[in-house]
Structures are given as structure tokens and as C-alpha cells.
Image (cartoon, grey):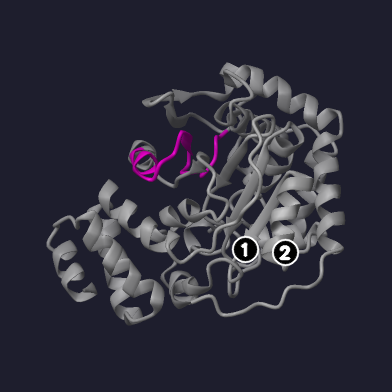
Amino acid sequence: MIRESIQKVVMGENLSESEMEKTMEEVIVGSAAASQVGAFVTALRMKGETVDEITGAARALRSRVPKLNFRTSESAPLLNLDRDDINVEGETILETSNTRENSTSTFNVSTATAFVAAGGGVRIVRHGNRATSMYFGAADVLENLGVNLDISNSDVERCIEEAGIAFLFAPLYHGSMRYVAALREDMGIRTIFNLIGPLANPAGASRYMMGVYDPSLTEKMIQVLIKLGAEEALVVCGEGMFDEISVCGPTKISRLINGHTETHTIQPEEYRFKRADRDDIRGGNARENARIIQNILEGKAGPRRDTVVLNTAAAYVTAGLDSDLKDGVRRAVEVIDSGKAKEKLETLVQFTTQCVPFVRKDLS
């Protein structure tokens, strides 16, 4: 199937949702050669992925991911707060650094946002992939913060219910993605894998907040989320191709709310944030990014905190806790200043370090 799909995409033809699902299934189970996968995803990006293609690929990946089971709660809404990890593609690594191993273009904004959102009453489930050679991603940062990520399914479910926040990382949940992990790093560019990874969250929440790497994708991903059954969703792309809301310039936001969609652009000044330079939110290695997150949760002011506050405000709006971003900003500031966000990190560390070590198994 993949050979036929490559030929069609190279000719500029779009695949149907069914064709894409079957092709991606070959990729996920490892029956396609690495050269075929590389040619296929590169051709897709050059052509531009369609809504049906992204949806079909996401359905294939979702079918391979084990689902979590836990109680729903109207008082504590569940939110998929996802973006594809910063630790895979070379496009996310700061090109001006002395070596590609010492700095990232931004710190782990979504990881810090998760703790503030959880401190405000949203149940947060984040997931992603571990890198094979780089050391900047959320998994590495969380481990530097003291979080144990190798816990069982049942402990993850208890963690969501008791701590209100959980992090799920491959190969624990995306064992079959091992067939493309090395390829992604070798290619060094973002591909359809960056788009479908956040759509396969095992928690199965109906509310999503996700970032994308190109502004042309925000409306497209909203349509994908509708096809996948989302009830509420917010898809963002900040200036400079940030996968979060930016304090360095305008951010394009597409939203699904009450069954209809809307797209608009926001500026940091609208929410009384001073516009920052990109260097002001630069990250480092895992240890440095963990320190940055600790400082934010402890109340240190500056552009990094502003970025987290604004992104958390969007999470509150998506979860239904606040009606607009200005109310969400006020809530996020209170959660940080009161210490509730820091308490969420401490609770997560305490819970996960008491869990019995999980022995990983092949999930293909």
C-alpha cells in the first residue's frame, strides 16, 4: 500500500482517509521500509497534509494505543494538553547554539503550563515520545524535576484521580512508534508524526489544547479534531512557529466552541504582557529547563512566566473554567502566586516515586 501512496502523493494527489489509515498502519507495525517512510512523509509535507490524511493517520495510531480508564468529573474537567515533544526534530533545536546538544529554542512551556492548569482545577493528561539521543524533551525535564515516569497503567489512572495530573511517555504507550523514532531524528524535520502524536492521547479526553508548528495548520487541525469527536478545542501557533501562544508576537488561534469554529489573532499587549524577544524565553538542556520551570512555579517574574500564564489561561478557557483569556490570566496568576501550581509538582513527585517500578513490554 505504501508504494502506491508514495506515487500518488509525489504526483500531488491527496489520499482518502481510508487510504491514509491503511498506509499508516503499515508504517506503525513496521512492515514499511525506512526509506519508504521517509519518502512518504517528506512528500506529504511538501504537498501539504489534508484533513482526511491527518485524520486517517491519527485513527491508525489511536488503534494501537491502550486506553486509560478513570472516573469523569464535572467539577474537574479533563483536558488533553499536548504538542509533539521538543526532543525529536532538529527544527526545534536552536540553530545558533555552539552545539545542537546545549540549548533549545524555547523552554518546555507546555510542561510548566500543565502544572499551573492542574493547580487551577483542570485534570491534565500529557503524553509524548522519548527521544533516542537528544536530552531536551518533557520526559527528560520531568525526570530532572523528580517525577518517575515508569509507572503502570493502574498507577497512571490513580495518579489522574488523586493528583489531577499525569504524564504518559513512550515506549510505555507508543511502543509501535519505535519503528519511526530514529528515522524522525535522522530526517530532522517536522512531519505528519508531529501532528498525529498529540491526537493519540490514551486518556481519551474530549477537550484539546494543542500547538502546531505552522499557522496554516490551526484551522486544519480543528477540522481533524471535529472528525475525531472533540467537543471543545483550541489550536494555536505563535510567531516564529512556536507551538504555543507567544509573548514575542502575534498568535493565531483556531477554536471549536459549542459546535462552531472561529479563528482570530491575539497580541501579548492585549493581556498587559510586555512583548519579549525570543532570547528571553530560550531554553537549555533538560536540567536547565527543569530549573526554569521550578523558578516559574515559585513565582519568578519575567517573559517565561508570562508565556506560561497566557498558555494556562487558554487551557482554562478550553476546559470551561473561564469564559475568556483575561479571566484565565487572572486565575493563572493567582494559582502561581498562591503556591498551588508548585504543590501540583510536589504531589506528582511524591505519588510517582512511591509507585512500584514498571517493567516495559513490547506493545506492538
Q: Residue at x 73, y 46 (%)?
A: 161
Is residue 237 one of those drawn in magenta?
Answer: yes
Label 2: which secondary element: loop
Which residue is pictured at 56% across the width and 33% down the height? 248
- Judge whether residue 191 can be spotted in this image: no
The answer to whether the residues at label 2 and label 1 have Cβ atoms under 8 Å apart is yes
- Which residue is labeled 2 in the image? 149
In the rendered structure, find residue 134 and report the number of the disc placed on it. none
* Residue at screen point 14% across, 57% down: 12
Q: Helix or strand or loop: what does disc 1 sit on?
A: strand
**Residue 146 placement (x, y as % from top left):** 83, 60
Taking 230 as reference, is 67 above or below it? below
The magenta-colored residue range is 223-246
Q: Please state the horizontal and vertical placement of residue 152, each as a whole percent of the image.
A: 71, 67
Picture layout, residue 9 above or below residue 72: below
Residue at the (63%, 34%) spot, across then down: 77
Q: Three-letter amino acid code at disc 2?
A: Leu
Give coordinates of residue 88: x percent, y percent. Answer: 53, 64
| Label 2 neighbour load within 10 Å: few <14, some 14-19, many 20+ | many
The answer to which of marks 2 and 1 sits earlier in the sequence is 2
Tell me: residue 251, above or below residue 159.
Answer: above
> Disc 1 residue type?
Phe
Left or right: 291 in relation to 24: right
Residue 40 vs residue 257, the one in the foreground: 257
Would residue 286 be found to the left or right of residue 241 on screen? Answer: right
Q: Which mark is residue 169?
A: 1
Residue 208 falls inside the magenta stretch? no
Residue 316, above or below 217: above
Which quadrant, please, contains the N terminus? bottom left
Q: Position of residue 15 (x, y in %)?
A: 19, 58
